[in-house]
Amino acid sequence: MNRRNLLLSGVLGLGLLASSAVPALADTLDTIMQRKKLMVAIDLGNPPHGMMDAAFKPTGSDVETAHLLAQELGVELEIVQVSTPNRVQFLMANKADVVISALSITDERKKVIDFSTAYAELQCVVAAPKAMNISSYADLGGKGGIAVTRGTVNDQELTRGTNGVANVQITRFEDDPTSTTSITSGQLQIYATSLPLLNQLRKDNPKLDLDTKFVMKGFPLGIALRKNEPKLQAKLNEFVKKNLDNGKLVEIYHRYHGVTLVPADLAAKS
């Protein structure tokens, strides 16, 4: 072998050695199937999406959706309890495989994480006592504090909508239970929140004077996953389409929220 071929052989050999020393990056779907367990981040303080029943067992529409996904994958479900503000952080820190927790699909979030196609929809609303004359963002000035959970789409839409409105006082809380308590205790009277959470709040407190004043925006909800996970994303999309078409996801959402999802409408918003 001449000197040129010997050098070339050595370079190729080093290249093969270097490439063999770099472990292949496993897709999260492979990891889930190998461990035989699906780890799903869910906020159990966000009824009726996630909550604890009388026996202190997790329940809610997102909990049932997670069970259905694990069942179809043929693996055990492990619920990773999170709060609304740290759902994405837990996912990015590899503490969960996916997030199924009323997480709205937004352009801002899509810069950091990926989503499945929409499996449900969430309306963000502003609610207040019946006697309060509120029908738009412009009416929120000078009405006192507005409760909202920090970092949610409710917070984002409220902040955007009241930009330029004088005398608006937004009071941000770290999670939904604390925001809700500020309303039920009488600390604040105006609540920017999701319609399902508002409906649950009124169901639990039938004497609470809290009317829906206006809808800020409707958002499709997706199953969140880390970026660059094509196999897992394809499997999640397949799961969503199949179970919207066969009515299982529609039935789950209607049972907890009293809202009938229209699969074609969700597909258009994904």
Image: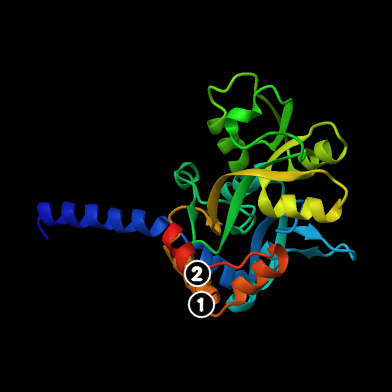
Quadrant containing the C terminus is bottom left
According to the picture, the residue beneath numbered tag 2 turns out to be: 263
Q: Residues within 10 Å of mark 1 (few under 14, many from 20)?
A: some
Residue 31 location (% of width, % of height) = 56, 66
Residue under the image location 84 percent in, 31 percent down: 187
Residue under the image location 42 percent in, 61 percent down: 268
Q: How is the image coloured?
A: rainbow
Tell me which numbered mark, 2 or 1, is placed earlier along the sequence: 1
Residue 59 figure quarter: bottom right
Name the element at disc 2: helix
Position of residue 84 relative to residue 223, above or below, is: above
- State how far apart marks 2 and 1 are (Cα): 7 Å
Quadrant containing the N terminus is bottom left
Q: Hey, what amino acid is under mark 2? A: Pro
Name the element at disc 1: helix
Task: Report whether residue 137 is seen.
Answer: yes
According to the picture, the residue beneath numbered tag 1 turns out to be: 245
Residue under the image location 54 percent in, 50 percent down: 218
Residue 216 location (% of width, % of height) = 57, 42
Position of residue 52 relative to residue 105, above or below, is: below
Residue 231 location (% of width, % of height) = 44, 67
Residue under the image location 44 percent in, 64 percent down: 267
